[in-house]
């Protein structure tokens, strides 16, 4: 079952809120993962960054495959049936619900993003199996309690949930605040819940230069962090092996990933 949406919570058509005068993260990232939902302003900075640091294309593709493996692991080996995907981005191949419901058709997924273009395309995220359920929330990571309240319309928050936040926490400039937002989201989920995070890391000069170029483009800035800082998001959780590693190295399962010098780290942690 899926919830249809045509308008955002404020009642205005989401189309009217789309700003094509400056790059937006969801559209920029969609350009990097090979999607088709971007504007000239996103492609311009995208091409500039591909020139500075071609490795960002690998980050985009390997982190989507990391998402697939993490969700397959959670739905398969851990029996997780509920997913909360915050900073969803534009629909692309193998969205969270498609991966989860291939393993367990009764999985429920709530997507959360605050970009109007994601809202416009969100119906593509609402193609649930009949046994499962998907929903989309036009909501803000900076208000975790509201996200949890709204997610409870679809998810049973007394049962384990996997919170998925990929390539999004860099938008929160202050590291302490980013950790606090993650902590508050996890606080609303019961023991046995999981946290899945991956993010670009300041592990090469190319990535740092790419980040500087992006941040001077007029887009909402993105802060690439150190590996220790990515690992710090999992404090208080039991890290699943192989802990926090470069994303292609996280439990490769024959999808083409393996050891590769990609500037993105990720992991999965379990709430005890
Ligand atoms: C780089 S994209 C990542 C998309 C997807 N998670 C992936 O890894 O392919 C970052 C996403 O975070 C969303 N985002 C940024 N700030 C947000 C906020 N405060 N609340 C909700 N979503 C936000 C953006 O709109 C964008 O879709």
Image (cartoon, rainbow, N blue to C red):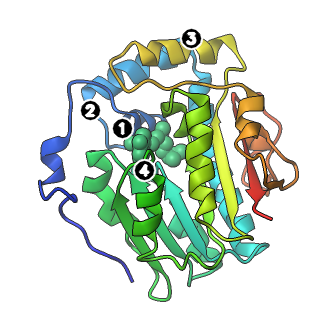
Q: Secondary structure at mark 2?
A: loop
Q: Is residue 189 visible?
A: yes
Cβ at disc 2 under 8 Å from ligand 1: no
Q: Nearer the viewer, residue 197 or 156?
A: 156
Which label was assigned to residue 117? Answer: none
Reading the image, the residue beneath label 4 is: 143
Residue name at image x 44 percent, y 23 percent: 221
**Quadrant hosting residue 206:** top right
Q: Quadrant of the C terminus?
A: bottom right
Is 159 left, or right, of 3 in this rendering? right
Residue name at image x 32 percent, y 18 percent: 218
Cβ at disc 1 under 8 Å from ligand 1: no
Q: Earlier in the sequence, mark 3 or mark 1?
A: 1
Q: Earlier in the sequence, mark 4 or mark 1?
A: 1
Residue 68: where, in percent of width, then height? 64, 58
**What is the crowding at mark 1: few (fewer than 14 residues within 10 Å), some, or many (at least 20)?**
many
Q: Nearer the viewer, residue 191 or 63?
A: 191
Residue 209: where, in percent of width, then height? 56, 11
Cβ at disc 3 under 8 Å from ligand 1: no
Which label was assigned to residue 39? Answer: 2
Q: Earlier in the sequence, mark 4 or mark 3?
A: 4
The residues bearing labels 4 and 2 have C-alpha atoms spaced at a distance of 28 Å
Q: Are marks 4 and 3 in contact (CB under 8 Å)?
A: no
**What is the crowding at mark 3: few (fewer than 14 residues within 10 Å), some, or many (at least 20)?**
some
Residue 6: where, in percent of width, then height? 19, 64
Reading the image, the residue beneath label 3 is: 209
In the depicted structure, whether residue 145 falls above or below residue 43? below
Is 124 left, or right, of 180 in this rendering? left
Which label was assigned to residue 27? Answer: 1
Q: Quadrant of the N terminus?
A: bottom left
The residues bearing labels 3 and 1 have C-alpha atoms spaced at a distance of 20 Å
């Amino acid at each position: 079952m899926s919830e249809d949406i045509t308008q955002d919570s404020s009642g205005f058509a989401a189309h009217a809120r789309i700003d094509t005068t400056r790059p937006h993260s969801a559209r920029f990232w969609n350009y990097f993962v090979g999607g088709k939902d971007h504007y000239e302003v996103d492609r311009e900075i995208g091409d500039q960054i591909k020139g500075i640091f071609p490795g960002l294309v690998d980050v985009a593709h390997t982190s989507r495959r990391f998402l697939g493996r993490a969700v397959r692991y959670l739905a398969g080996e851990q029996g997780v049936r509920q997913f909360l995907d915050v900073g969803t981005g534009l629909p692309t191949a193998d969205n969270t619900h498609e991966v989860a419901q291939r393993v367990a058709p009764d999985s429920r997924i709530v997507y959360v993003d605050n970009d109007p273009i994601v809202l416009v395309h969100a119906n593509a995220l609402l193609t649930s199996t009949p046994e499962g359920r998907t929903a989309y929330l036009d909501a803000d990571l900076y208000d975790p309690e509201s996200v949890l309240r709204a997610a409870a319309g679809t998810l049973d928050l007394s049962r384990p949930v996997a919170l998925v936040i990929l390539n999004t926490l860099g938008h929160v400039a202050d590291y302490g605040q980013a950790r606090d937002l993650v902590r508050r989201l996890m606080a609303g989920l019961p023991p046995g819940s999981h946290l899945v995070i991956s993010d670009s890391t300041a592990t090469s000069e190319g990535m740092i230069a790419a980040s500087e170029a992006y941040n001077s483009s007029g887009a909402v800035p993105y802060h690439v962090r150190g590996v220790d800082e990515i690992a710090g998001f999992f404090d208080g959780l039991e890290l699943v092996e192989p802990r926090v590693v470069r994303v292609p190295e996280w439990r490769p399962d024959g999808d083409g990933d393996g050891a590769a010098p990609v500037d993105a780290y990720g992991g999965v942690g379990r709430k005890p």
